[in-house]
Amino acid sequence: MKIRLNRINEDYLFECTNAAGNTILLDNTSQPDAKGVSPMESLLMAVAACSGIDMVSILKKQRQEITDFSAEVEGERIQVDEAKPFKDIKVKFMLEGIIDPAKALRAAELSFQKYCSVSKTLEPNVTVTYEVTVNGEAV
C-alpha cells in the first residue's frame, strides 16, 4: 500500500492520493481558512470507515436490510511531550432498516475485536469503545 502526498498551496494544504487515483485533502485546521480535514480527524474517519465497512459486509452476508448507516466518532487526546495523541476513541453506530439488533451488535464486536485494521493498529495505546443503535434503540 502506498500513497502520495503533494503540497497544493503555500501553507499547509496537502492532497493525498492512493494508487487508484482517489484523493483526500489534509490541512492544518487551526488555520481559519483550512480547506481539508486535519490528520487527526482523518484518523477518526478511518476508524469509523474501517469498522463501518466490516459491519456492512457482515450484515449483508446475514441478509440484513440496511436502509441507513452512519457513525459519530469522538476522540479524547492527551498531552505527551509536544504531541497530543488520542487516549480514547468512542464510536457510535446508527443503523436503520430490517436489522436484528443482536446481529448488529455482534458485527461491531467482530469488527473491533478481529477485523478492523485501523483500530488494531492503534492498540494498545488507544482505547476504542463503541455503541450501536438500531432504528433509534440502543442495543
Image (cartoon, rainbow, N blue to C red):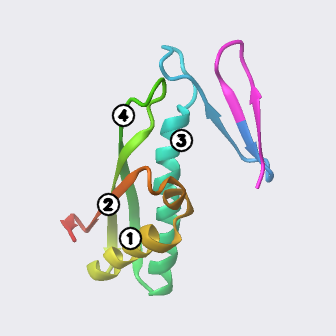
Say which of marks 4 and 2 sits in front. Answer: 4
Label 1 crowding class (10 Å Cα cut-off): few <14, some 14-19, many 20+?
Answer: many
On screen, 102 above or below 13? below
Residue 124 picture quarter: bottom left
Secondary-structure class at tag 3 = helix
C-alpha span from label 2 to label 1: 8 Å
Name the residue rendered at 59%, 26% in the picture: 27
> Circle 2 is placed at which residue position?
130
Q: CA distance from mark 4 to mark 3?
A: 18 Å
> Percent from the top left, x then y, of residue 56?
48, 72
- Pointers 2 and 1 in contact (CB under 8 A)? yes
Circles 3 and 2: CB atoms closer than 8 Å: no
Which one is nearer the viewer's eye here, 134 or 52? Answer: 52
Marks 1 and 3, the one that precedes in the sequence:
3
Q: Secondary structure at mark 1?
A: helix
Furthest toward the bottom, the residue is: 62
Q: Tell me which amino acid carries mark 4.
A: Ile
Query: Considering only vertical position in the picture, is 20 above or below 108?
Result: above
Element under disc 4: loop
Residue 46 vertical position relative to residue 137 in the rendered view, above or below: above
Q: Are marks 1 and 4 in contact (CB under 8 Å)?
A: no
Q: Residue at x 57, y 29 (%)?
A: 36
Q: Which mark is residue 78?
A: 4
How far apart are labels 4 and 2 at the CA level?
A: 20 Å
Q: Amino acid at mark 1?
A: Ala
Residue 28, image quadrant: top right
Residue span colored magenta: 1-15
Q: Which residue is mark 3?
A: 42
